């Protein structure tokens, strides 16, 4: 585990240097920042407070999961005012004097807000209401703000809409006796007089009286009997308003109905959910009702769609505009706390409250505004939100954009080309009528995914519902690879003054055209705008009802069942959002664009955005980066503990805990480092560098585990094996094992990171391997010979062997101890303390004797030839005495398990042959040295007894040669 120690210490140092600044700001500490909420948590109006408090809690949870505010945990303190002015006043004093809250979110109603506002100003605590709309709430109170337009703006806007869009000349006002109803009715009455809109009747419902329902039925009866009653404007809160609407619908009153923002809430629609007629026909009581609201989700931005989705996933119900406004209200408060560096310390609470109020007051223009789910948030000098209003209409229980909206004209000169009947004078502003086109997309098939080129093929249906006097199908796909035409019209229909057109589209589009802000996801999107009509005259809105986006889970299941995404790609559709935004196009010098703020042309762009994710396990879906960092710190602590313990107690089993804790800490640090890096890069660097960084981390996720696995093999396999056998595992085996693991990782990187086919790589690498093989065939022979030597158990590290030379005589061989069997050579340590390196291929071909097999004790022999004159029994005795005489030597037969023994071995011409047999354990005694010592001792003993070694005897024979006598031939003749 020493190999793991230094890298791990380096990693810890790296984490301390670079992780601390992040977690200093991202993790929560003991200090807590408090925000108070005051609204109806109980009573008959609790439903209205539920959506608001749920949205606030959603934001607070998101902040805390992301590390808190400047490293401090955010806590929401809840106070129930029951929508009662007296209780609201008491609660506001309690919050201001006794709580640690730095800001207040609330109250819901204007009456409760006005009761609490003076106390907030008196004690100096800023408050932001997400729903109170009366002008008196913020008037002359610099400590009170709101994230919705006030009733003065709303009342005038509704009145102009009735006159200029609905084309009604008469209106009947029905109000209750609340501050909310009274003020809206007054504004409408005053405005109607200026624009020639007749108030046919004005009814007041006194809610304190017990006969409220009778008052309602009497009013409804008068309306039915008055053919000049016109459109009905209901200036009430949602609960009483729902009761009045129910009676209207049951009485079959056919007058058009328009309502203020209080009716654009789930509290209003929930009043009908259990009624038989509503169950039988969803939307029976609400269909066709116009409602004013600060925002409608089908025209909202991408941030709003994400909020819409998250709210539904967490709470299982759809959010309304009040929830979105509350989300932005708490966002503004938290941003103020963050940017003023509030600490929540008790002694600094008054000062920090004051700093937060000053910051909110400074957010007073679009440039300083903070973008939220309802758009850009900034305040007027009175603390009112400056935002456009929308008119929605209920369809099947849902609030969708009305077919005509009113939008401000940026410059008076731009109004010159707009028809006079489409221009509305609103106070000192000019508004223009904007056509709304309900647009939906249904995907049939997705194929040809190529994230390398960032393209994909999509087959889908697209439809438009709009007024018949416009052509919404004249569009251009802004992310198409090549220009795409809609083609033939599949179906068309005209009903209730609306035209419906359905087209089928096929084509290639650019992937990741719209950012996903999640590096592990890709976006497959369809984006388009009208070719010529600008946003001031046409807005594409999401057909929420027709597309089924209200139930995203069911839609995802439908995608899986229909396999719209080819399964072969191993990707799945994880989420879907559709929204509209603004696309700024180059004006090319058009005259009209000269009066716009930036000289560009704005178009309404429709975006259908699918998030696809590779199938597999994602750890960050279950645990946070903070939790992983805690695991990392715990693992480091465990590692340090066992490391210190091993310094005092030598226990090999601690290696397992060291490896586990070290591996866990490395993996956790890698996860944290990746998350930190990617989170930091998102939104700061180009997408290309973001993807490159992710590829780098993907490669590291192959390299780091390989390193950990190799250390694990050494910890769990090689080391225990060495301890059990008391012999060192050859390094060649370890290296080959590591090389195989690394090789698999290399192919894994090629296949899974770079998405390349391994078959072609193997073919190419095979050819390269052949070329290299021929070039280094000698080295290859050595490597494979080394493998064979390691696999063959005839030789092991620590064995004493003799590599034979020209003959089997030990004097011609090399005797030594096997030190290592490496990649190229086998290393022998000889008796003279030298290291002999023998190439593995050469060694494999040699004849060698292993003195350690079949057991460690080996028998050696020495031959002596003595003269025939020496009696055998005397000769054996002298040889044995000589061998035993060397027992006092430090390295001698004293290590032998058996005594040396001489015996007659044979006879030759020189004399009698005797063999001395002796036994040694070669790892304890040098065989060569012992052999020399015994020979010397025997020779000395023989000499002392007058005996010499026999040597060959030569017998010489001398022959006398007679002189040669010559015979005379002539004498013979005589």
Image (cartoon, rainbow, N blue to C red):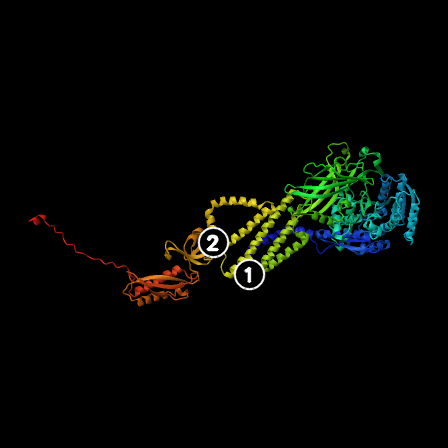
Badge 1 crowding class, 10 Å Cα cut-off, few under 14, some 14 to 19, many 20 or more, is: few
Q: Earlier in the sequence, mark 2 or mark 1?
A: 1
Outermost residue to the front: 491
Q: Secondary structure at mark 2?
A: helix
Q: Is residue 439 left or right of residue 870?
A: right
Which is more toward the observer, 111 or 406?
406
**Residue 749 placement, left or right of 210:** left
Q: Quadrant of residue 91?
A: bottom right
Looking at the rendered image, the disc whose residue lies closer to the viewer, 2 or 1, is 2
Which labelled disc corresponds to residue 652? 1
Residue 118 visible in the shown view: no
- The span from disc 2 to disc 1 (Cα, nearest Å) is 31 Å
Residue 788: which numbered mark, if any?
2
The answer to whether 640 is drawn above or below residue 531 in the figure is below
Q: Is residue 175 visible?
A: yes
Residue 772 placement, left or right of 665: left
């Amino acid at each position: 585990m020493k190999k793991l120690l230094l890298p791990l210490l380096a990693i810890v140092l790296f984490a301390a240097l670079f992780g601390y600044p992040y977690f200093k700001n991202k993790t929560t500490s003991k200090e807590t920042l408090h925000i108070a909420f005051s609204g109806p948590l109980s009573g008959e109006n609790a439903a209205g407070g539920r959506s608001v408090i749920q949205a606030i809690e959603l934001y607070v949870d998101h902040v805390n999961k992301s590390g808190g505010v400047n490293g401090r945990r955010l806590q929401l303190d809840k106070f129930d005012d029951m929508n009662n002015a007296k209780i609201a006043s008491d609660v506001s004093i309690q919050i201001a004097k006794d709580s640690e809250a730095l800001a207040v979110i609330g109250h819901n109603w204007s009456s409760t807000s006005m009761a609490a506002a003076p106390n907030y100003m008196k004690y100096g605590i800023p408050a932001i209401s997400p729903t109170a709309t009366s002008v008196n709430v913020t008037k002359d109170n610099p400590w009170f703000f709101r994230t919705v337009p006030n009733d003065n703006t709303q009342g005038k806007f509704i009145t102009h809409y009735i006159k200029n869009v609905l084309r009604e000349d008469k209106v009947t006002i029905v109000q209750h006796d609340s501050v909310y109803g009274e003020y809206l009715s007054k504004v409408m009455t005053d405005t109607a007089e200026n624009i020639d809109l007749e108030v046919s009747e004005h009814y007041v419902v006194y809610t304190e009286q017990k006969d409220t329902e009778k008052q309602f039925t009497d009013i409804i009866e008068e309306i039915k009997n008055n053919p000049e009653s016109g459109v009905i404007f209901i200036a009430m809160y949602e609960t009483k308003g729902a009761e009045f609407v129910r009676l209207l619908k049951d009485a079959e009153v056919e007058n058009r109905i328009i309502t203020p923002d209080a009716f654009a809430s789930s509290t209003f629609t929930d009043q009908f959910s259990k009624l038989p007629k509503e169950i039988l026909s969803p939307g029976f009581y609400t269909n066709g009702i116009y409602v004013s609201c600060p925002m409608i989700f089908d025209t909202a931005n991408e941030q709003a769609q994400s909020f819409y989705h998250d709210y539904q996933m967490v709470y299982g119900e759809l959010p309304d505009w009040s929830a979105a406004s509350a989300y932005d209200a708490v966002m503004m408060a938290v941003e103020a706390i963050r940017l003023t560096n509030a600490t929540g310390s008790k002694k600094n609470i008054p000062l920090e409250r004051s700093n937060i109020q000053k910051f909110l007051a400074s957010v007073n223009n679009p440039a300083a505004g903070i973008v939220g789910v309802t758009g850009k948030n900034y305040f007027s000098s009175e603390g009112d939100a400056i935002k456009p209003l929308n008119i929605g209409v209920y369809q099947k229980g849902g609030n969708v954009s009305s077919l005509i909206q009113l939008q401000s004209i940026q410059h008076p000169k731009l109004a010159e080309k707009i028809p006079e009947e489409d221009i509305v004078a609103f106070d000192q502003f000019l508004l223009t009528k904007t056509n709304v086109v309900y647009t939906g997309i249904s995907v049939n098939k997705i194929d040809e995914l190529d994230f390398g080129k960032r393209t994909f093929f999509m087959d889908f249906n697209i439809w438009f519902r709009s007024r018949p006097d416009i052509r919404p199908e004249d569009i251009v796909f802004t992310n198409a690879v090549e220009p795409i035409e809609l083609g033939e019209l599949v179906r068309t229909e005209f009903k209730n003054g609306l035209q419906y057109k359905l087209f089928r589209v096929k084509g290639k589009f650019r992937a990741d055209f719209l950012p996903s802000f999640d590096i592990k996801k890709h976006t497959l999107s369809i984006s388009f705008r009208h070719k010529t009509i600008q946003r001031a005259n046409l807005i594409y809105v999401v057909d929420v009802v027709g597309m089924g986006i209200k139930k995203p889970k069911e839609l995802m299941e439908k995608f899986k069942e229909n396999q719209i995404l080819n399964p072969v790609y191993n990707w799945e559709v994880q989420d879907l959002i559709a929204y509209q935004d603004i696309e700024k196009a180059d004006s090319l010098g058009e005259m009209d664009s000269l009066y716009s703020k930036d000289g560009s042309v704005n178009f309404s762009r429709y975006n259908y955005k699918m998030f696809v994710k590779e199938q597999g396990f994602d750890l960050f879906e279950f645990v946070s980066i903070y939790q992983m960092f805690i695991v990392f710190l715990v693992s480091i602590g465990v590692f340090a503990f066992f490391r210190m313990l091993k310094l005092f107690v030598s226990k090999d089993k601690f290696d397992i805990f060291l490896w586990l804790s070290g591996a866990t800490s490395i993996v956790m640090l890698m996860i944290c480092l990746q998350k930190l890096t990617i989170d930091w890069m998102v939104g700061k660097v180009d997408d290309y560098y973001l993807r490159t960084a992710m590829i780098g981390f993907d490669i590291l996720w192959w390299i780091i585990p390989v390193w950990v696995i190799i250390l694990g093999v050494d910890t769990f396999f090689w080391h225990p094996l060495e301890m059990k056998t008391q012999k060192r595992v050859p390094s060649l085996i370890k290296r080959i094992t590591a090389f195989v693991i690394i090789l698999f990782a290399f192919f894994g990187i090629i296949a899974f990171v770079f998405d390349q086919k391994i078959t072609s790589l193997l073919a190419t690498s095979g050819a390269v391997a052949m070329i290299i093989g021929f070039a280094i065939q000698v080295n290859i022979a050595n490597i494979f010979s080394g493998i064979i030597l390691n696999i063959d158990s005839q030789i092991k590290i620590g064995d004493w062997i003799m590599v034979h030379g020209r003959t089997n005589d030990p004097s011609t061989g090399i005797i030594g101890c096997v030190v290592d069997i490496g990649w190229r050579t086998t290393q022998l340590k000889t008796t003279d303390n030298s290291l002999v390196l023998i190439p593995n291929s050469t060694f494999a071909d040699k004849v060698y004797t292993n003195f350690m097999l079949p057991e460690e004790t080996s028998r050696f022999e020495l031959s002596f030839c003595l003269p025939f004159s020496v009696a055998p029994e005397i000769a054996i005795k002298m040889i044995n005495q000589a061998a035993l005489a060397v027992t006092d030597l430090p390295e001698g037969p004293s290590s032998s398990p058996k005594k040396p023994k001489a015996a007659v071995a044979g006879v030759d011409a020189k004399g009698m042959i005797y063999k001395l047999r002796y036994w040694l354990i070669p790892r304890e005694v040098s065989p060569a040295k012992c052999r020399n010592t015994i020979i010397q001792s025997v020779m000395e003993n023989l000499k002392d007894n007058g005996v010499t070694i026999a040597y060959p005897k030569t017998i010489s024979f001398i022959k006398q040669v007679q002189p040669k006598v010559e015979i005379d031939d002539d004498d013979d003749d005589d």
